[in-house]
Image (cartoon, rainbow, N blue to C red):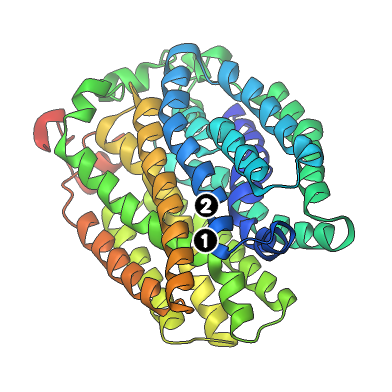
């Protein structure tokens, strides 16, 4: 078996026990226990998540830049170890909410080392023609984590309390995710005498030649930064990220306000995870066959329908359908961010570019969660902020339709569809 698939499997497991499932997708399960323990409003509890996202947004570009300079292993392994130790330290937190703010901000600083920012760089170097499906399987780990981790944490909170729940998660990171990443993760196929997609030098192609022939090395960070297409992508990701994060993080509280049980609200979070699971692999498969911006527009429109259902008071099965559609949008966005950046700007500065893009996505999540909590505190309902996020998601779908053709399309696209390779100066 091509060693790249082992890299994908190791990355998927690491993402399953990374910042996404533990910090982001499970935050809604912690919401009411935290509010009760600290005697704080929902906006005050949301501020912790906002601080975490702000720290993650600021540090994600630095993580990407360090990976571009020093290699993935030298960044991912120590970052994962620190992430696990911070989670374990939850048992020592003080009684004031300010200590929880510091705890969550510290998690945000190292979150990029356990996020798609780090692992997408690795997987993208191992795959070219099958990059979409490889990224999809990698992100499958985050989808599985989004399904299993909130339910497991809900049980841990019920038995041991929220502090111990975070500590148990830290132990899993240190004892499972970190060792497997240390054994199997390799940053470049050249280390195994291979080229992307498993081409060997014995087949007449020197390692790395596939990138050289197609210009896959890509644009420099300076060229990417000054390109209008990059900012168009960032704007779309920001609007969509704010919308889906706000809905997912506040969904358990929203549904319990409408009469759902705590278990039923946790089930809605798991439905989001199931949708993420489907979208991760499905989008990855489709990205190798269809134009990424059009796929993004379709998924974002579907998420808009889900937000509309929540806006107009969906409950019961309708609420679960809304959770599913929003989860599809969130899952698809994760794959499309990495894939689109690699196809429009190449891999030369991919870590840095993805760091900034992911930072914008995370920053959007912080703003979205805070706006949703603040909107609830001001109006005692979620209707007004949901209407704003509905408009934002529809705008994100429209922006994706404004992108031009790929710069670095894979060779099989050119051959099968008769599309000439797109030159770097063709967009922006």
Structural distance between the alpha carbons of marks 2 and 1: 6 Å
Q: Residue 75 vs residue 82: left or right?
A: left
Q: Nearer the viewer, residue 105 or 73?
A: 105
Question: Where does label 1 land, which residue?
Answer: 43
Q: Residue at (40%, 54%) from the top-left corner?
A: 241
Q: Is residue 426 left or right of residue 351?
A: left
Q: Quadrant of the N terminus?
A: top right
Give whichever of 126, 200 is nearer the camera.
126
Q: Position of residue 33 (x, y in %)?
A: 73, 62
Which residue is pictured at 74% across the width and 62% down the height?
A: 151
* Residue 89 tag number: none
Q: Secondary structure at mark 2?
A: helix
- Residue depicted at 69% across the width and 47% down the height: 96
Q: Position of residue 29 (x, y in %)?
A: 68, 62
Image: 293 above or below 352: below
Quadrant housing residue 2: top right
Query: In the figure, 382 relative to 94: above or below?
Result: below
Say whether residue 254 is left or right of residue 393: right
Question: Is disc 2 in contact with disc 1, using a CB cutoff of under 8 Å?
Answer: yes
């Amino acid at each position: 078996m091509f060693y790249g698939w082992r890299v994908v499997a190791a990355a998927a497991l690491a993402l399953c026990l990374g910042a996404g499932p533990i910090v982001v997708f499970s935050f809604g399960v912690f919401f009411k226990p935290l509010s009760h323990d600290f005697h704080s409003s929902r906006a005050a509890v949301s501020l912790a998540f906002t601080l975490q996202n702000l720290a993650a947004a600021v540090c994600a570009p630095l993580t990407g830049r360090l990976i571009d300079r020093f290699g993935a292993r030298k960044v991912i392994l120590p970052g994962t170890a620190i992430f696990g130790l911070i989670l374990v330290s939850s048992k020592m937190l003080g009684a004031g909410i300010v200590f929880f703010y510091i705890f969550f901000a510290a998690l945000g600083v190292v979150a990029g080392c356990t996020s798609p920012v780090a692992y997408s760089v690795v997987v993208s170097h191992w795959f070219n023609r099958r990059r979409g499906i490889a990224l999809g399987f990698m992100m499958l780990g985050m989808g599985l984590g989004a399904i299993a981790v909130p339910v497991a944490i809900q049980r841990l909170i019920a038995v041991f309390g929220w502090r111990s729940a975070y500590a148990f998660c830290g132990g899993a990171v240190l004892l499972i995710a970190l060792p497997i990443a240390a054994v199997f993760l390799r940053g470049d196929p050249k280390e195994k005498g291979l080229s992307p997609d498993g081409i060997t030098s014995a087949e007449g192609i020197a390692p790395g030649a596939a990138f050289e022939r197609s210009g896959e090395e890509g644009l420099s960070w300076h060229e990417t930064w000054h390109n209008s297409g990059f900012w168009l992508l960032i704007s779309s990701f920001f609007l969509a990220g704010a919308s889906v994060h706000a809905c997912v993080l506040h969904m358990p509280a929203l549904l319990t306000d409408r009469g759902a049980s705590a278990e039923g609200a946790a089930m809605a979070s798991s439905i989001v995870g199931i949708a993420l699971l489907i979208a991760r692999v499905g989008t990855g498969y489709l990205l190798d066959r269809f134009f990424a911006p059009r796929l993004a527009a379709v998924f974002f429109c579907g998420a808009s329908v889900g937000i509309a259902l929540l806006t107009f008071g969906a409950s019961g099965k309708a609420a679960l359908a809304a959770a599913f559609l929003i989860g599809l949008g969130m899952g698809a966005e994760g794959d499309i961010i990495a894939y689109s950046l690699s196809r429009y700007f190449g891999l030369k500065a991919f870590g840095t570019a993805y760091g900034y893009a992911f930072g914008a996505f995370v920053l959007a999540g912080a703003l979205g969660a805070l706006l949703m909590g603040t909107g609830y505190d001001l109006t005692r309902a979620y209707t007004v902020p949901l209407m704003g996020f509905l408009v934002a998601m529809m705008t994100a779908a429209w922006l994706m339709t404004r992108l031009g053709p790929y710069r670095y399309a894979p060779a099989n696209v050119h051959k099968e569809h008769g599309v000439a390779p797109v030159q770097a100066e063709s967009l922006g």
